[in-house]
Structures are given as C-alpha cells and as structure tokens.
Image: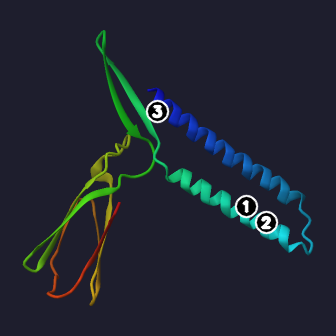
Amino acid sequence: MNEIKNELEDYLTKSKNILLTCENLHKSIENYESGNNDMKTLYFISIIHHNNEKACNLLKTKIKNINISWCYDSFANYENYYFNGIPIPKDIKIERIGEQINVNWDLDDSTLKDIESKDIKFFILIKGNIFDWIEKTTNKNIIFDKCYENINYEIKVRS
C-alpha cells in the first residue's frame, strides 16, 4: 500500500508542477508586449511545446490504485486496478491456415475499474502489397480471409 501511495503522491506532484508552470507561463504571456522580440516569442512557443509534451506523457502514464474490501472479522481482500489508460494488446499470435490468417492476442495486466473487457474495442490493420484491410472488433481474435501467396503482410493491433 505504501508503494501505491508513493506513486499517487508522485503523480500528484508532477501534475501540480505542470499546472504551476502553465500558470506562470500564462502570467508571463499576459505581461508580454508583442513587439519585434522574435527570440522571446520563440522562447514562449518552446516552453508551451515542452509543457504540452510533459502533460501528454503524464496523462499516458497508468495510475494504479488499490481496492481493499474487508470480509468478516480478519480477512482483507486487496485488488490492484488502474483508473486511467487502456489495456494494451500483448502476446499477439499470427497463424496462417491455408488462405486465412488467424490473429489472436491477450491484454496486459491492466485492470480498469468499471470497464469490462467486452467494452474495449480493437483496431486491426493488415497491410499487404495490393491493399490494406482494416477491421474493428471487440473480440480478441480476428480471421483474415484474403491471404495471398508470396506477399508479406504487416499486422497492427491497437486498443
């Protein structure tokens, strides 16, 4: 529990620092007189871009929490879950059977609170020399029927 508490505090500190930097930048821009000072303008643009990258990376970070439930007098059940992000497909297996390609995958160990695996949509892109095939599904597998000999396929699975 201490590990999760420290991770949550670290995330809070990082998000406060980004917000503080944005507030300071906003005050500086309000006081900035738009003259012919191109260097100062480029500096502000650079700081804005840098803060945007930091914020985007922080939002992509999976945040883990713990759900504790007490059963009877002395038994406690601990369950880790994430409350942001999406599970990432892993262990992608591709199998060619005749003229078909069978693609299967699992999800990483992310357990999102209040989201069931049937609610997650997957986007599959199969690129070939002749055409691209795009499919959306909620299943963790897909069968591609239009497989040709002597063609290399590139397959991407995203959630």
First-in-chain label (3 vs 2)? 3
Marks 1/3: CA–CA distance: 31 Å
Q: Residue 7, which numbered label?
A: none
| Residue shown at 67% from the left, 64% from the top | 49
Q: Residue 47, which numbered label?
A: 1
Q: Amino acid at mark 2?
A: Tyr
Marks 3/2: CA–CA distance: 37 Å
Identify the residue under disc 3. 4
Marks 2/1: CA–CA distance: 6 Å
Depth check, front residue: 85 or 3: 3
Residue 71: x %, y % from top left: 29, 16
Q: Is residue 124 above or below residue 119?
A: below
| Residue shown at 79% from the left, 50% from the top | 24
Quadrant position of residue 152: bottom left
Q: Is residue 14 above or below residue 152?
A: above
Mark 1 in CB contact with mark 3 (< 8 angstroms): no
Query: Taking 54 as reference, is 132 left or right?
Result: left
Residue 9: x %, y % from top left: 57, 34
Query: Taking 154 as reference, is 82 left or right?
Result: right
Query: Helix, strand, or loop for circle 3?
Result: helix
Residue 26: x %, y % from top left: 79, 55
Q: Amino acid at mark 3?
A: Ile
Mark 3 in CB contact with mark 2 (< 8 angstroms): no
Mark 2 in CB contact with mark 1 (< 8 angstroms): yes
How crowded pointer 2 is (Cα within 10 Å; few <14, some 14-19, many 20+) is rated as few
Query: Helix, strand, or loop for circle 2?
Result: helix
Residue 39: x %, y % from top left: 84, 71
First-in-chain label (1 vs 3)? 3
